Structures are given as structure tokens and as C-alpha cells.
Amino acid sequence: MPPLILDCDPGHDDAVAILYAARRTRLLGITTVFGNQSVERTTRNALSILTLAGLELPVAMGADGPLVGARIDGGDVHGASGLDGAELPTPTAAPDRRSAVEFMIEAAHAHQGELVLCATGAMTNFALALEAEPRLATWLAGISAMGGTIQVGNTTPVAEFNIYADPEAADRVLQSDVPLKLVGLNVTRQVGVDEAEIAALRQGGRVARAIGDLLAFFRESLRRVHGLSTASLHDPCALLPLTRPEIIDYRDLPVSIELQGALTRGMTVVDFRTVDPTKVGSIRPSVATRAEIALTVDAAAAKAEILSALHEYG
Ligand code: RIB
Ligand code: CA
């Protein structure tokens, strides 16, 4: 199991990703970013979840806005705190003295060729770290991110929240040639917990009960805002390639991030064509940037795997 940093914006599904990663991966620490709420709130939420579960891990605060443009926030879905819906403990630890960028670079230098970064929010911290230390691209074993979609969007008709929050950052990460896995809404929306699974969590131990309350709030938000009937476990899906690689199928494909389009900014444009553009002058060539794009999932196995880890906490 490779050493891992989880860069996140807790956020309800990020909270599940933290608890899952702490049980099932070699989690070195957490870095936080703006997105579902301000970075001050997402950092507090990460520390709160660690306190809830009795976990001692460094949490290094990161960027509070995108490389370009205004900060978006997901308060309409995740609430004013970014993690509404449960009584969570006041954090017993403070944020790490290092910034997210410093923490990422230090860890990658110490674990050259091994470290995996998991992104479950905007990719701003990774982009800034790559800019601060270009050798990071050779030190990293890979990045596994929750982001994008090959079908319907959420923040816009065609763009997914994490990419839309900072398209320039996602583009820089893509251009860095660090091996990138992207699991998008087309997969993660299939991995949604329903009322019965939430009720089962609420019958569990202290941690499971709190997560059950959080997911009940999240499910209601997704119903109200997006008309969904389950609470999508978007973010923990980005960890499954490390822990249960048979659950999600990825395919290596050309992909680019739309930065300009008035209607399409933040869209992940995946090229599924098989034509050889060199043979037909009218066809636009494919892009050079590639990533492994998640296409299918064993949703039942994904939910069972993630929920089993949550029930292991007291
Ligand atoms: O589009 C889903 C993503 O946006 C998830 O990471 C969720 O936490 C929000 O950040
Ligand atoms: Ca997130």
C-alpha cells in the first residue's frame, strides 16, 4: 500500500473519505482546500472528523480560492459550516504549522516514487505545489481524483464541481504528466447510500451514528438541489483504485479541461473517437493530454466496501 495524502474540502463525502482512508490506506496526512466551504471551515471540519474518530493525523491548510477568478462554495449542499447535520466534537488538535503545499512537497521528497495524492476537492493545492517544486511531478507515483464527468454535470449542465471550482488548476495537473486517475459523476452518482443504509449507520457505534446523521443531511440536500434519492459517496470512490482496484474500471483516454467556453468552462472533454485524424483533413486531432477515466463501477461492492470501514469505528 503506497503512502497517501488526502487533499479534501470536507464536505460530507470528504468526511467519509477521511474515515475510509484512515482505515484502509497508509494515510500520512490531510491537506485542505476551499470548495464546499472556505478553507478555514474545511480545515476545522477535517480536524473535527479526526477528533470524532480518535485519529491523530496532520492537517495542513491550503488554498482559499482558485488560481483564476472568484471562489465558489458548496454551502447550498453542505450547509453553512460545510459539514451540517450532526453534533461534531470541537477539534482537539490545531492545523499543522506547514501549509498544504509545504506538506505535499515534504512528503513527496521523503517518499520519492511512492507517494500518491488523492484529490477530493479543487486541485489548487496540487497545482501550486507543482509550481513551487517542479520536481514534484517526478517524485509522485500518481494522483487519484474525484472530478469531472463524461455525462451530466452538477455545477453546470456539463461541468462537475471540483473541476469547475478551479479549471486552471485541473489543467495544470493534467499537463504535468503525473499519472492521473479521474472518477467522475457518471460513476460516483451510482455509489449512493439510501435511507436503509443511513438507518443502519445510525444503529452503529458513535462514529457510524454521526456519519449517519451527516449523510441524512447530505441526502436531503442532494434531493432538494439535484432531485437525487441517495447520498452520493463521490469522494471515497477516488480511494478505491488503491484499496479495491477491481471495483471501478478505468480507461486511458485523451482528456482536456475547457477553460474558455461561456457555457462549457470546467468541462472535462474526453475523446472516445477511434478515427485516425491524420487520414481525414476535416477531423480535428485528439489532444496529447491523457488520463485514466472511470467508466463503470460495481456500485454494490463499492458501497459495501466503504460502509464496512465506517462500521469498524467504535
Ligand atoms: O461534485 C462532487 C464533488 O464536489 C465532491 O468532492 C463533493 O465533496 C464536492 O466537493
Ligand atoms: Ca469534496
Image (tube, helix red, strand yellow):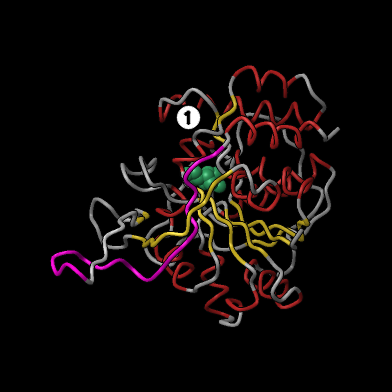
The residue positioned 47% from the left and 45% from the top of the image is 295
The residue positioned 65% from the left and 61% from the top of the image is 61
Question: How many badges with numbers are in the image?
Answer: 1
User: Residue 150: x and y, percent?
Assistant: 38, 46
Q: Nearer the viewer, residue 139 or 48?
A: 139
Residue 17 within the magenta-colored segment of the rendering: no
Residue 286 within the magenta-colored segment of the rendering: yes
| Disc 1: CA contacts within 10 A as few (<14), some (14-19) or many (>=20) | some
Q: Nearer the viewer, residue 270 or 309?
A: 270
Please give left or right for residue 91 compared with residue 83 in the image: right
Please give left or right for residue 106 compared with residue 189 in the image: right
- Image quadrant in which you'd find residue 212: top right
User: Residue 211: x and y, percent?
Assistant: 70, 31
The residue positioned 43% from the left and 54% from the top of the image is 163
- Image quadrant in which you'd find residue 253: bottom left
The image shows residue 17, relative to residue 122, as above or below, that is above
Residue 36 shows in the view: no
On the rendered image, what quadrant is the C terminus found in? top right
What residue type is disc 1 on? Answer: Leu
The image shows residue 313, relative to residue 173, as above or below, that is above
User: Residue 21: x and y, percent?
Assistant: 72, 48
The image shows residue 242, relative to residue 11, as above or below, that is below
Over which residues does the magenta segment extend? 279-297
Q: Nearer the viewer, residue 71 or 300?
A: 300
User: Residue 180: x and y, percent?
Assistant: 53, 62
Residue 295 shows in the view: yes
On the rendered image, what quadrant is the N terminus found in? bottom right
Residue picked out by circle 1? 222
Helix, strand or loop for disc 1: helix
The residue positioned 66% from the left and 63% from the top of the image is 116
